Image: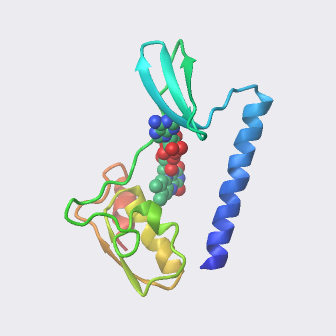
Amino acid sequence: MQRLMARKEKVIQDQAKGILDLFQRHRIHYLRGKGAIEKPGSATAQLGDGKIIEVPWDRLIVATGTQPCSFPAFPFDGQQILSSNDALCLQEVPASIMVLGGGVIGCDSPSFWLSLALRSRWWRPRIVSSLSPQSMKIVPR
Ligand SMILES: Cc1cc2nc3c(=O)[nH]c(=O)nc-3n(C[C@H](O)[C@H](O)[C@H](O)COP(=O)(O)OP(=O)(O)OC[C@H]3O[C@@H](n4cnc5c(N)ncnc54)[C@H](O)[C@@H]3O)c2cc1C
């Protein structure tokens, strides 16, 4: 598992470096920080050192992604109750794991855990409907 995680980190770093190189080559101005939209035509970025700078814009694309959603009664604790992101950071293979959810990640991850010879139980009230009818038949197997 440690080798797997080390490999994962290397792939992430290589990919991130590749993207930063592309930004540089195409003279894309990259700011690392927390963005906020203050008013039309202007955003602020809080940089790593806490400094806040103003960034004017003509067109704005918001691409802030998504976050895993927990059940209020069972908040993620990173130990027993894991988000799909937490599951990618485990340092040891657990004795067993239950995957809750039948979306793309919920369908994908049981096969990953099975490849690590782990007993994986899959709770899927409804399999993601964007799959083709053929895939819908195959996935539960
Ligand atoms: C476990 C897992 C497995 C996946 N597997 C696959 C796969 O095999 N194939 C596939 O195609 N897709 C896969 N996906 C989905 C894929 O990762 C997402 O669809 C994709 O990352 C979405 O890209 P995005 O740019 O919209 O958002 P993200 O990749 O989530 O990026 C959003 C970025 O915005 C930043 N951000 C948020 N708020 C602010 C703010 N206020 N200021 C500045 N920055 C901010 C975040 O820090 C983040 O860096 C997987 C996702 C997960 C979680």
Question: In this view of the protein, which residue sits in the foreground, 95 or 123?
Answer: 95
Residue at position x 45%, y 83% from top? 94
Name which residue lies at 35% across and 68% down: 77
Q: Residue at x 70, y 62 (%)?
A: 10
Q: Residue furthest left?
A: 73
- In front of the other: 10 or 121: 10
Q: Closest to the observer: 93 or 91? A: 91
Q: Which quadrant, please, contains the C terminus?
A: bottom left
Q: How is the image coloured?
A: rainbow
Q: Position of residue 107 (x, y in %)?
A: 40, 64
Image-quadrant location for residue 65 = top left
Q: Name the quarter where the N terminus is drawn.
A: bottom right
State the image quarter where residue 100 is shown. bottom left
Identify the residue shown where x is 27% and y is 66%.
124
Q: Is residue 93 above or below residue 49?
A: below
Q: Position of residue 34 (x, y in %)?
A: 51, 36
Is residue 63 in view? Answer: yes
Q: 49 or 77, which lies in front? A: 49
Give the side of residue 40 with respect to residue 52, left or right: left
Q: Position of residue 69 (x, y in %)?
A: 31, 54
Looking at the image, is 45 positioned above or below residue 55? below
Q: Quadrant of residue 20?
A: top right
| 4, above or below 101, in the image | below
